[in-house]
Amino acid sequence: MLLSTLNRKEKLKFLDLALHMVIVDGNPSDLEQRLLNMMLAEVGDNIISEYTFDLSDSLEQTIQFFDVLSSRIQRIVYLNLIRISLSEEIYNTTEHDFLEMIRSRFHIKDDIKQALIKEVYKEKDLREEINKIVGK
């Protein structure tokens, strides 16, 4: 969501950060892999051709890249990390801790975090409702 508004380097770094998050608890699940592929498609064809789902930098270097960017970009990145984390039905403490570390580094306040989570749940509800309608 909103990943297409990022520039080329921001998109590549986001994908790297997302990959760090999904492997924090082991190999990505099938659902996480599908979501990563959807996000890869969202960032555009030019990025698809050059991204290989290999970690290009250390986690710290990737976070440092985002540390100096605008709060808008940081929030877009954080929003999409939340989407990945909430894609599975099981609560994952390791991913939660990862998100909290990112939130702290990006100086995202709790009210913004809660608002973003609320919107992710709205998106999930909308998708489920559309699937019900289409499935009829």
Image: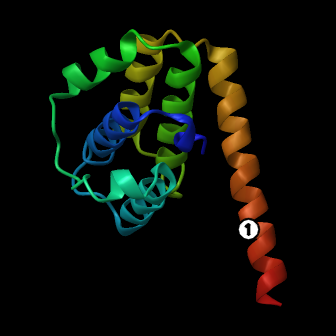
Residue 42 position, x and y percent, is: 51, 54
| Marker count (numbered) | 1
Which quarter of the image is occupied by the N terminus?
top right
Q: Residues within 10 Å of mark 1 (few under 14, many from 20)?
A: few
The image shows residue 78, relative to residue 16, as above or below, that is above
Q: In the picture, residue 15 is in which quadrant?
A: top left
Badge 1 element: helix
In this image, 18 relative to 112: left or right? left
Query: Closest to the observer: 26 or 18?
Result: 18
Residue 9 position, x and y percent, is: 34, 32
User: Which three-letter amino acid code belongs to the residue tagged 1?
Assistant: Glu
Residue 110 position, x and y percent, is: 63, 16
The image shows residue 115, relative to residue 31, as above or below, that is above
Query: Closest to the observer: 68 or 49?
Result: 49
Q: In the picture, residue 120 is in which quadrant?
A: top right
Which quarter of the image is occupied by the C terminus?
bottom right
Residue 97 position, x and y percent, is: 38, 28
Residue for badge 1: 128
Name the residue rendered at 28%, 15% in the picture: 64
In this image, 83 relative to 30: left or right? right
The image shows residue 58, relative to residue 68, as above or below, that is below
Q: How is the image coloured?
A: rainbow
